[in-house]
């Protein structure tokens, strides 16, 4: 029977997407792993690959179609010996089976006692009842390597089959910790609904005025919902420090001259990433995230860095940042930022981390308060380095390049004193850059 190709869930937050481009056409033969389409998620444009082999019998969703729900059939794949005439039969089968499954619902015990009767039996493996797991060979191999229990995953492939993307997006530790909060998500969404005037009310306010309506894309919707949730549910508090950068700027200048032949140019942001990563190792209790009903403490320093793009932002994560050299951090950050702006990041590259950095200093912003990106425990808002009068250690008045930073902290994860220790460690690392690299 023909196999339906379903709209996949290509990111942890994806509920719908845009079918940007088909890479195959009707009549093409495809094998497992071949690219089928480009799909725009709430974060990026990603390539979607085939799970099974066969012939593309019919494309059900046209290029450019927006708002395609996850698990919606987008095409039909024909197996050996099947033709386009079989597509209609496949479509009719679920409709015919529906009354039977409805009748069977009131008597589940009878259905279990005699599974061979009726058409309900073939559907049992598709019902995720635990009797059998459908997963592609590649997904099984990745799951084995990562130690992921396939019984805990919901497949986004044809007929609920677990595919590569499902395993790569899986976060088994976080999943167990967040089972309880997930149940309360609808209530939180309902509570958030009346937070402001609706569309009709707002439009009436501006009757007679020229304006343009901007339709929200998936990314803007996600940014709006996640940050609203963050401000409503996370008990933020803020810690501020001024950091003198003169020693760092001199050290950076020296390093850049030495690295010029290698084509490496370090930015102040590279030093900030390194300083934060080292500080999380120095204050390990602060290297933590909120997981619904408990705190998860991380061992490595996985630092997320906010990258502005048209219409939104990404927070790619530099994993094991404390173990990397400045030149390695710089190269990785440039690569991640470039692909973020092209919306070419894979989900595993912007999911995770315990701490984030948001730097608006290049825009001339002196200081600001950043919103925590859940489940992170904290985020550092970085302002511009500007010349200011300071009192030196010898008591004399002088001039220094001073950068103002604000640490936004989740009080559920990090208390005031612990947050102060973390920010002091970041300050010390930046004001003593040579020691930071020792």
Image (cartoon, rainbow, N blue to C red):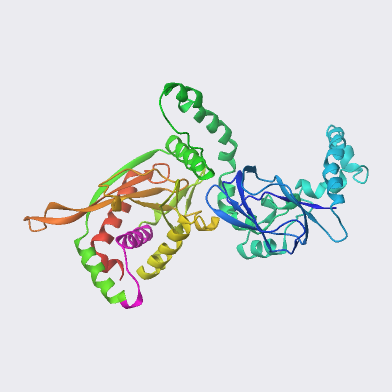
Quadrant hosting residue 106: top right
Residue 55, quarter of picture = bottom right
Which region is colored magenta? 261-282
- As drawn, the residue found furthest toward the left would be 396
Q: Is residue 384 magenta?
A: no
Task: From the top left corner, tell me how far across and down residue 126 is, in percent.
Answer: 78, 48
Q: Residue 69, relative to residue 169: is it above or below?
A: above
Left or right of 324, for residue 56: right
Q: Secondary structure of the magenta portion, mostly?
A: helix
Locate residue 384 relative to residue 129 in the image: left or right: left
- Closest to the observer: 355 or 219? 219
Place of residue 285 in the rendered image (x, y in percent of width and height, measured from the top left): 40, 53
Q: Is residue 272 magenta?
A: yes
Q: How many marks?
A: 0
Nearest the eye: 192 or 294: 192
Q: Residue at x 55, y 50 (%)?
A: 174
The relative height of residue 97 versus residue 208 in the rendered view (above or below) is below
């Amino acid at each position: 029977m023909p196999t339906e190709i379903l709209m996949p869930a290509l990111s942890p937050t994806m509920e719908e997407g845009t079918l940007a481009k088909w890479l195959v056409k009707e009549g093409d033969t495809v094998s497992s792993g071949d690219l089928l389409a480009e799909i725009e998620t709430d974060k990026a444009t990603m390539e979607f690959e085939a799970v099974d082999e066969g012939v593309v019998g019919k494309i059900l969703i046209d290029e450019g179609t927006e708002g395609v729900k996850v698990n919606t059939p987008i095409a039909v794949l024909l197996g050996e010996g099947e033709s386009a005439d079989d597509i209609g039969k496949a479509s009719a089968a679920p409709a015919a089976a529906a009354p039977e499954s409805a009748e069977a619902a009131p008597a589940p015990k009878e259905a279990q006692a005699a599974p061979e009767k009726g058409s309900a039996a073939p559907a049992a493996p598709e019902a995720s009842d635990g009797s059998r797991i459908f997963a592609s060979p590649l997904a099984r191999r990745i799951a084995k390597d990562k130690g992921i229990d396939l019984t805990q995953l919901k497949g986004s492939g044809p007929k609920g089959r677990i595919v590569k993307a499902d395993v790569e997006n899986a976060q088994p530790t976080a999943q167990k910790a967040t089972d309880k909060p997930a149940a309360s998500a609808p209530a939180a969404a309902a509570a958030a609904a009346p937070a402001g005037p609706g569309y009709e009310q707002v439009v009436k306010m501006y009757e007679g005025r020229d304006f343009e309506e901007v339709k929200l894309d998936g990314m803007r919707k996600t940014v709006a919902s996640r940050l609203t949730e963050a401000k409503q549910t996370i008990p933020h508090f803020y810690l501020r420090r001024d950091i003198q950068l003169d020693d760092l700027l001199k050290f950076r200048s020296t390093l850049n001259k030495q690295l010029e032949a290698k084509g490496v140019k370090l930015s102040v942001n590279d030093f900030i990433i390194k300083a934060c990563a080292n500080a999380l190792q120095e204050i390990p209790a602060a290297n933590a995230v909120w997981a619904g009903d408990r705190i998860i403490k991380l061992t490595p320093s996985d630092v997320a860095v906010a990258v502005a793009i048209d219409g939104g932002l990404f927070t790619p994560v530099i994993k094991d940042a404390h173990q990397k050299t400045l030149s390695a951090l710089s190269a990785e950050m440039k690569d991640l930022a470039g692909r973020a702006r092209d919306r070419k990041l894979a989900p595993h590259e912007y999911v995770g981390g315990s701490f984030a950095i948001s730097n608006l200093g290049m825009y001339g912003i002196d200081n600001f308060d950043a919103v925590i990106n859940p489940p992170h425990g904290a985020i550092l808002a970085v302002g511009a380095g500007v010349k200011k009068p300071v009192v030196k250690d010898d008591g004399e008045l002088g001039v220094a390049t001073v950068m103002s930073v604000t640490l936004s902290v989740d009080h559920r994860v990090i208390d005031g004193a612990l947050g102060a220790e973390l920010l002091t460690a970041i300050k010390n690392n930046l004001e003593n850059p040579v020691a930071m690299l020792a």
